[in-house]
Amino acid sequence: MWLAWSVRRLSAGSAPAFGNPSSAPVRGQPFDSAGGEAHTERMRVESDDPVALALSAEGAQRRQRACMPSQPVRVGLLLNPRAGRARNPRMRTELQGLLDGPDAWAETWDLGSVRRALAVLLCQRRANVLAIAGGDGTVHHVVNALVDLTTETALLTGEPVPMPRVLILNGGTLNIVGRTCAIHGPPQEILGKFLQFFAGAPLSRVPARRLPLLEVAWRQGDAPVAMRYGFVFGSEVAYHAIELYERFGAGYLGLARFLAELTRGILWGSELWQREGWKLGPFADGLLVDGVHYPTYTGVAASTVDLTLAIGAAAAVRRRLYQPGFSARVVQALDPKTIIGLVPAMMADRPVAGLDDYPTVRQLRLFGPYTLDGELFHEPAHAPHRLPLTVAISEQRLQAVPGEWTAEDW
């Protein structure tokens, strides 16, 4: 049921958004771009360390110039070859063939390569439209790296650093964010259509929908407050549901097997249910929704975007444009048999006893592991003390290109 909120990827043969990080991100220091020696150093750093360039005053100025409304559209493609559709070599070749050179795209095989790829595309390529080919998990990690790189550059240089337009190419299965922007079709078709309408045009002609981001903050011990950004949040029950689901195989067949086993375990008891049933709640750590206290609860999900399920068959949360805050749905502390009966209502945006809907939430406070855009965070073995979490709206906004353009309109 909670997979309806934050399931990772349901396509056959799906894989994590990226593999394990193979290297830590390289961080540089700002440097003076004036004078001959500084110019030589800048050129050396540009070729050897694009991240250092991105974090410099020169990098900030390049992004400022690239994102001026009068500048021509320059697309930079970030492609995750491990994601669903992007695994197809033919599709990757077709995507790359649409672009105007090898510097216009970058493949990211692991998390450690995302930051460097962004630095190359935004500061060496000087892209002002960032195309992302991958699933919801890929979008999640790229957005986080983009926000972190942009924020860090602004802090180091004192320069305002604009965000590029983001064109989501729907390389996954659910593609929640892409469908929120009315993006449909295979990645190469989406990119080809965009270039047909906007290649050579000034950036000012490219529409953008400002998508708000959730900000999940926590602190462990004396460490500074850490943050992650995303669109769809799920509490501990979502974390465990995804974890259990993955044991039954990938794709919708795996999901069907999981739901069947879950129902069988709740109604008649099974070895799996007796061993793992506690993972589906209720939980007694408490939840605060804008000051409304739930001493115990089964789960909570939050979103800044429409959640379209089953390839558009149902919507769990509908959000109006300019609606303040974010939407949240709380499942009260209920027995498992009652929860099974609520599954249709959970998936159909229908009010029912036991489900509390909050359309304009400012803040959630809770504990435990969580999911964000279907990715799992704070594995209990690594965070055994159930870290306190705060979920709020971020000041950051994603400038997402919508899919409603036509030749007549543009």
Image (cartoon, rainbow, N blue to C red):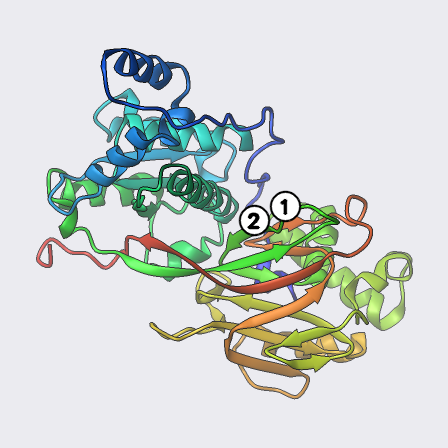
Please state which of residues 375 and 98 is positioned toward the viewer in this rendering. Answer: 375
**Measured from the top left, where is residue 289 in percent x and y?**
62, 76
Q: Which amino acid type is marked by label 2?
A: Arg
**Element marked by disc 2:** loop
Mark 1 crowd level (few <14, some 14–19, many ≥20, 10 Å Cα): some
Residue sitting at x 25%, y 35% = 61
**Element marked by disc 1:** loop
- Is residue 24 visible to us here? yes
Mark-to-mark CA distance, 2 and 1: 8 Å
**Measured from the top left, where is residue 387 in percent x and y?**
74, 56
Please state which of residues 142 and 397 is positioned toward the viewer in this rendering. Answer: 397
Q: Which mark is residue 250?
A: 1
- Quarter of the figure that contains the C terminus: bottom left
Cβ–Cβ below 8 Å for labels 2 and 1?
yes
**Measured from the top left, where is residue 403 in percent x and y?**
27, 56
18 left or right of 116 in image: right
Q: Which amino acid type is marked by label 1?
A: Ala
- Is residue 96 visible to us here? no
On the image, which quarter does residue 365 sit in?
bottom right
356 left or right of 322 in image: right
Please state which of residues 290 and 98 is positioned toward the viewer in this rendering. Answer: 290
Residue sitting at x 82%, y 50% = 384
Which residue is identified by label 2?
9
Q: How many marks overall?
A: 2
Residue sitting at x 38%, y 34% = 78
- Quarter of the figure that contains the N terminus: bottom right
